[in-house]
Amino acid sequence: MTTSKKYIWGAFFALSLLLQFSCKKEFLEIEPKGQKILATANDYEQVLNISNIQTFLPANVYMGDEMSAMQSFYNELPIRMQRLFRYDDRIYDAGATPNEFSSSDANEAIYIRRLYVFNKVINSVMDAQGGTDAQKLAVMSEAKVLRAICNFMFLSDFSKPYNAATAATDLGIPDITKSDVNQTNYTRLSQKENYELMIKDITDAIPNLGMLTHRRKISKLTAYFYLARIYFAMNNYADAKTNLELAFLELPKANIPVALYDYNKVLNPFGGADSWLPHSGFGYTGPKPQVINDTETIFNISATKIVLSAPNTFVLSDRAVALFDPADKRLNKTDVMDLDWAFEYPNGMTRPQFSFIPEEVGPVLPDLYLMRAEARARTNDLSGAVQDLVALRIKRTSETAAKIPANIAGNQQALVRFILDERIRELFFTGARWLDMRRLSQDPIYKDHVKYSHDVFDDAGNVVQSFALKPERFALKFGEVVLATSKGLQENP
């Protein structure tokens, strides 16, 4: 790619990001310190809608083992992206350079700002003017689920994978429950305490939550989904299954459409009335629905992840591409050519289409099916697991390819491994694989499903660099700036 073209693409994506984020303000940016500007129950409810937990360039999307990188573009990446992809110890310098985020834009700072908002609602909404007690309880309950989600994301970035044998002593994250913008004392709890608090927040909230009415409003369905995701992180598949079954009972109660798309239609490369194709280098030009109308989205948490100089760098690895059947339409969300359509990736590797950026990283219907399939398989309900798999796969590939071979369907370990592969096929480039890698690293049977390295390829498809995942880098370091301004915060090894 020529230098001039790179600047053109960079300007385009910078403009896209400006348009996306210029109309959104974090609550802390508009609230004067020490002043209470919220008065009514409706004010608190609106704050939750304004202060979503969308995440800008999250760390985990660069760390999944389904990804590789192309050498010809890699060295031009922002430093932060390179360091995350390499599993470096240091992500942020003490003095941020123009080519990386400042400490105030680091993941931990973003989580802390959002926790302030949720705590403000939880601690004050019951004293708000107007509204019924039921409305106030509902708003407080939504904020509790949002706090648990935010803490789970925070914990997944900065704490080692959960191990029941050591969770009582392994460091988690600070318990931030006060709405105090001047708080600087952030002593870390144990992982066991963190997980118990997240589970309690959601469990306490569920009785006051309603059906799914909006994709940016917390519902019982979202709460059950996240309880299951937390139990997955703990490798507790029995309790995860209980909550997943409750989540499925909520689906028919939703008063907005919730359904799987048929990729045989919407990702039909030959077009058609329902197709989102054809596409250009920028992505799909067809009628792909906005996230608010996306019937697979349960609760919208979007992430802008590959921008500016990165559009051609990150690719689905050759190892991951080999998992797809030729009839699988999910690869139509990617492109084998670079953004200029001047270079074809080697070894069948393929880059994400930009119509899928920002990518949905919150609870989606396909993940609900896959989580229940895995929980069922791990608890020896093999026929139920196969049923969930086929229900998803029939919407992604041909009727013949959707079937699960008998030698896999009847073997628990083979079926679990098939489901883990299916999670890569369905959820690549969303950060979901990083969460799977974390929990699988503690699994004595399936830890070999994780590839503990990232590869960089030259244009001919040869591996020219390989970066090993050190076990301690399942937890990011906080960095010098954050440590210097946060009393009692202990750094990760």
Image (tube, grey):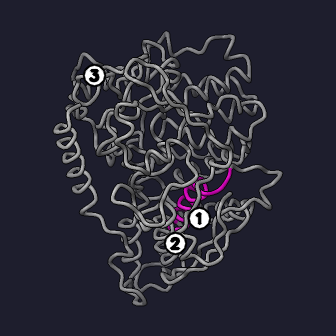
Pointer 3 local density, CA inside 10 Å: few below 14, some 14–19, many at least 20: few
Residue 311 position in % (x across, y down): 32, 37
| Residue 144 drawn in magenta | yes
Tell me the SS state at disc 1: helix
- In the image, residue 302 lies at what x, y percent? 39, 50
Q: Look at the numbered disc 2 and give the secondary structure of its residue.
A: helix
The total of numbered circles placed on residues is: 3
Residue 151 against residue 385 in the figure, above or below: below
Using a 10 Å C-alpha cutoff, classify the residue at mark 1 as few (fewer than 14 neighbours), some (14 to 19) or many (20 or more): many
Disc 2 and disc 1 in contact, CB within 8 angstroms: yes
Looking at numbered disc 1 in the image, what kind of residue is underneath it? Answer: Ala
Res. 138 visible in picture: no
Instruction: Please identify the residue farthest to the bottom as the structure is shown.
Output: 34
Mark number for residue 140?
2
Task: Judge from the rendering whether residue 356 lies leftward or rightward of residue 207; answer left or right.
Answer: left
Residue at x 42%, y 36% (from the top left corner): 259
Q: Is residue 420 above or below residue 134?
A: above
The reply to whether residue 376 is visible in this rendering is yes
In the picture, the disc for residue 205 is 1
Write the start and end of the magenta stretch as one range.
142-160
Q: Residue at x 28, y 18 (%)?
A: 269
